Amino acid sequence: MLALTIALAFWSGTWRGFRPYLIVLTPLVGSIMLINTFLYPGAEQVLLSVGPFDATREGLTAAAQAALRVIAFAVSVGLFALSTRTDELVDDLEQRGLGRRPVFVVSAAVGTVPRLAERAREIVDSQRARGMDTEGSVLRRVRGLLPLAGPLVLSALTEVEQRTMALEARAFGAPGRRTILRHHPDTPAQRALRWGLAALTVALIGLALGGHLAWLP
Amino acid sequence: MSLELHDVSYRYAGAAEPSLRRVTLRLERGEVLGVVGPNGAGKSTLGLVAVGLAPATIGGRLGGRVSIDGMVTSGKHQHELAVRAGILFQQPEAQLSGSAPTVWEEVAFGPRNLGLPLDDVIARAWTAIDDLAIGHLVERDPGRLSGGQAQLVALASVLALRPAYLILDEPTSQLDPEGATLVGAAIQRAAERTGAGVLLVEHRTDLIERLCHRAALLVEGALRIVGPATEVLAESDLDEAGVGPPSAVRLRRAIEGAGIAWRAEWRA
């Protein structure tokens, strides 16, 4: 799965955008590797000792499996995010009958992340302008997060009430389906691929439940 | 044809005191009515009540009657009222949907919600954009506009629903002078081109003086004076209520205070 995803990432040219996903993943994968390799319960085949801790073969195998699963999941999510335009996804979901509220939640959530990040930057800048040290050691950076969290969360909560009223005032609660702005082409090949993937997923679940995939690591 | 508040009182949920007390006010189509008052006078509440958001969306207790062109708002769904009376709030960013990738789609958000035919949605969006002269912004991300531009987009979004009445709740209070000038001109243009009745809640009395036919002074939830804007804005009650009079009134008082007789032709 991981190999297929990486191949698709190179084929689609989205691999250049994977850097932030990999950076976010690094501490998680690192901790999985360390904890499993050194603290795997019941492991006996010691590879090396570091102080009171033993790195074991069983632990290393379990760590590699868990880390590969996490990487495969993250890379799949990254490939989806980097290769899919949110507005097209949302349009298509709406066209297929998804209600206006779930559609709004998806599109608003995607739009909210960069806006929150921008507001966080503004708050940090204003705090720096008033003399707060938010750079330097890890401890200083962590200390800098505390005064950021309050204004960020409070301003977001305050905005929610006004945004709710603004949405209501723009007929968001009207019954029936919204007007679809764009109709995206859906080729026979795309349809066949979708159905094929769905059938493959069902088949794999069936095989796994029947115990036919026990040979997989 | 008018938006009417008849003997309206309103108390927020959990509040000990009402925010509006027996307010009776009529807004005609084509009229621009300014509402001034000190902080906490109930100006914003008046706007929420006028469009039916209070109590329908935010709760609270309403007394009296609010009607839009004869239709009593009580018990009506908000989407039914949204096409009759639109509201613009103070904070520009907080009233954009946050879900539209471009300004054009943001403006089309309301008409799309109504499920109108696509041609109608497109026509309404472009009309609102043209009315406010914001065609140069249509491809921009609504989340990356200046305060004044975002407020214009929010106003266009409201206009696209083609309401007969517009409630503007301190639309320039969060803006810098340049943004306030931009939005002030847009309000004037929108009022002239749409023929809607406009209720402008503002603390900038210069803007009220420039745009409004009539003005009302609201103090502690009750209407103190209603009348022609130039007369209301020159009343000493404004100073007593803590509302700064417009520049022209201050200038006239300064001239008269210096012992010079005021001449009517100076006003022009």
Image (tube, coloured by chain):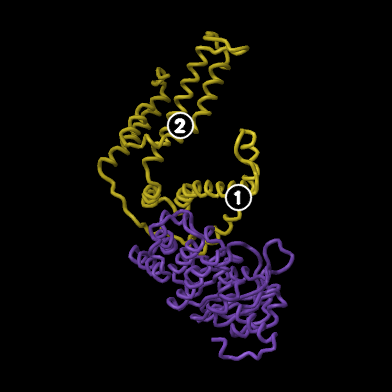
In this view, the residue farthest toward the left is: A188
Residue at point 68% right, 62% down?
B13
Residue at point 73% right, 67% down?
B17
Depth check: give the residue in front, B173 or A125: A125
Seen in the image, is B59 located left or right of residue B210? right
Q: Which mark is residue A126?
A: 1
Residue at point 39% right, 40% down?
A82
Residue A58 spot, x, y in % from top left: 51, 13
Seen in the image, is A154 located left or right of residue A71? right
Residue type at numbered disc 1: Ser
Residue type at numbered disc 2: Leu
Residue A169's place in the image compared with A150, above or below, is below
Sequence-wise, which precedes: disc 1 or disc 2?
A: 2
Q: How many callouts does the rendering have?
A: 2
Residue B68's place in the image compared with A157, above or below, is below
Chain with colour purple in the figure: B
Do discs 1 and 2 share a chain? yes
Chain with colour yellow in the figure: A
* Chain of the residue under the numbered disc 1 shown in the image: A
Kindly identify which residue carries mark 2.
A22
Residue contact at pointers 1 and 2, CB within 8 angstroms: no
Residue B185 spot, x, y in % from top left: 48, 73
